[in-house]
Amino acid sequence: MLPISYSPRTGQHHHNLRSYKGAVRSEQARWSLLAVLLLFLHDHLSCVTAYTGAAPTHAIAVPSTRSRPGSHPLADLVGSRLDLPWITSSVNSAYGPENRDFHADWFTPALPTQQAPIHALILDDTWTTGARVQSLAHALKIAGASTVAAVVLGRHIDPTYLPAKRLLGVIAGPVFDTTRCAVDADA
Ligand SMILES: [Zn+2]
């Protein structure tokens, strides 16, 4: 799992992640997130594949648990720009949007029937506890995916949470730099 950036609840990135989808969505937020995501994948998808050992063959967005039918807002935003076919997944309605735990039966992805190995790239907007991404990654492996990687636009931070205050202090100084990522930050 590779987060692109921390996303403090009081920050602009968080605002974009909240306002790029929904009935009254912000076009400015959409272009901003799309630019960050595509630039990051251009420069750092190789950092992901260095771990998995294979370039992704398919993309999948973590399905909304708010049961909005149709495609995912992030898949809509990215469209065909990654040149990867999208996998879709059904959602177990037993788990609500506020659920924060791993569930092996939360998602049932529909993998294409093909001989070649499937290397799935999960894309999600916000990582809070990671329960949804981890549940989907598990389901993809069970369904037969050879490798699963995840890239997340924002790692949510609650600034009022005491341990997060120390983190916010550490990351306050450096300006966000798309040439570095969490994998190669120490390089
Ligand atoms: Zn990198």
Image: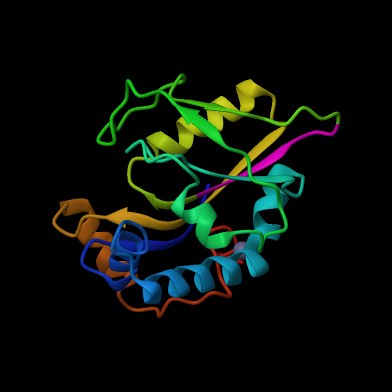
In the rendered view, would you say 49 is above or below 39? above
In the rendered view, would you say 25 is above or below 96? below
Residue at 32% over, 56% down: 22
Q: Nearer the viewer, residue 153 or 186?
A: 153
In the rendered view, would you say 137 is above or below 10? above
Give the left or right position of residue 81, taking residue 34 as reference.
right
Q: Residue 111's x, y, as percent?
A: 67, 30
Q: Residue 170's x, y, as percent?
A: 31, 68
Q: Give the range drawn in magenta.
A: 116-123
In the rendered view, would you say 83 is above or below 171? above
Residue at 30% over, 74% down: 172
Q: Main secondary structure of the magenta part?
A: strand
Question: Looking at the rendering, which quadrant does residue 45 occupy?
Answer: bottom right
Residue at 51% over, 61% down: 77
Most extreme residue toward the right, as rendered?
A: 115
Q: Which of 158 and 109 is in front in this view?
A: 109
Question: Looking at the rendering, which quadrant does residue 169 occupy?
Answer: bottom left
Give the left or right position of residue 93, taking residue 121 as reference.
left
Question: Looking at the rendering, which quadrant does residue 11 occupy?
Answer: bottom left
Residue at 61% over, 21% down: 142
Q: Which of 59 and 158 is in front in this view?
A: 59
Q: Residue 121's x, y, as percent?
A: 62, 46
Q: Residue 174's x, y, as percent?
A: 39, 78
* In magenta stretch: residue 36: no
Q: Looking at the image, in which quadrant does ligand 1 appear?
A: bottom right
* In magenta stretch: residue 119: yes
